[in-house]
Structure formats: structure tokens, C-alpha cells
Amino acid sequence: MHKTRGQEAWALHDLAKIAACREPLDTGAAQEHYRQALELAVSLGLRPLVGHCHLGLGKLYHRTSKGEQAQEHLTTATTLYREMGMTYWLEKVEADAGAAVMDRRAFSVGGIAVDGLA
């Protein structure tokens, strides 16, 4: 039974990723699938999937201009990946977090984008 529930959690994660890539973006479906996958992953102790769900939510919130929520999830993903020694994913989430910081620093002056001056 545990294996089936684990597969369900991964399937929910995959559905969330699909919804997050749609054009137009299906924010509600992506968010709901990530939350369901996260809840199930936590209950089953699937820590790598918990990290992936936080990373996905961080990217989703970043894409929808919810910077504070994005940063919270990216920070959680970073912590989890570091604790588990998942260096590939740690580098990936740190790159995403760096992009989020740069986006917050970018602003427009007379229609010209200016980076790093916030």
C-alpha cells in the first residue's frame, strides 16, 4: 500500500509540473496538485519529493510574482536538499533563488530595464 501511495504522490507532483507549464498558466491546478503531493510526501516520509514540491511551489510563486512565498519555498527546498546531500538539486534551487533575487532588483526607468538598483 505504501508503494502505491508513493506513486500517487509522484503522480500528483508530475500533474503539478504539467499545470505549471501550461499556457495560459493554470495556477490553481498547479498549486493544488503541489499541495496534495506535498501533504502525501510528508505523511509517507518521502523527503526528496517534499523538496521537489517546495521547489515547484517556489518556481510557481516566482512566476506569479509572489516573491515572499516563492522565497519561503525555495529556502525550504534548499534546506532539505542540503540535509539530504542532494547536490544537483541544491545547485538548481540556488540558481532559481538567485534568479528570483535578480528579478526583484530589476526595475524599469523610462521603459529601460535596469538591474541591481533596488
Image (cartoon, rainbow, N blue to C red):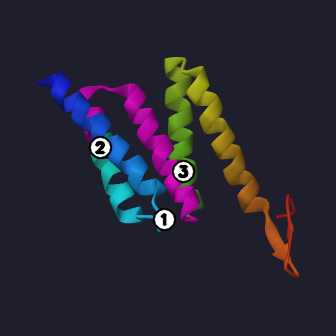
User: Mark 3, residues whose alpha carbon is within 10 Å: few (<14), some, or many (≥20)?
Assistant: many
Position of 35 compared to 107: left or right?
left
Count residues near mark 1 (Cα–Cα under 10 Å), then give few for <14, some for 14-19, many for 20+: few
Q: Residue furthest top?
A: 85
Amino acid identity at mark 2: Leu
Residue that mark 1 sits on = 23
- For numbered disc 1, what is the local secondary structure? loop
Disc on the earlier residue, 2 or 1: 2
Residue at 31% from the left image edge and 51% from the top image edge: 33
Q: Which residue is mark 2?
A: 12
* Mark 3 to mark 1 CA distance (whole Å): 15 Å
Q: Residue at x 29, y 43 (%)?
A: 12
Marker disc for residue 94:
none
* Secondary structure state at the residue bearing disc 3: helix
Identify the residue under disc 3: 59
Residue stretch in magenta: 39-65
Residue 29, given in percent of the width and then of the height, sits at: 33, 60
Picture coordinates of residue 73 (x, y %)?
Answer: 50, 46
Q: CA distance from mark 3 to mark 2?
A: 16 Å
Secondary structure mostly taken by the magenta-highlighted segment of the chain: helix
Residue 68, x across and y down, in percent? 57, 58
Res 51 → quadrant: top left
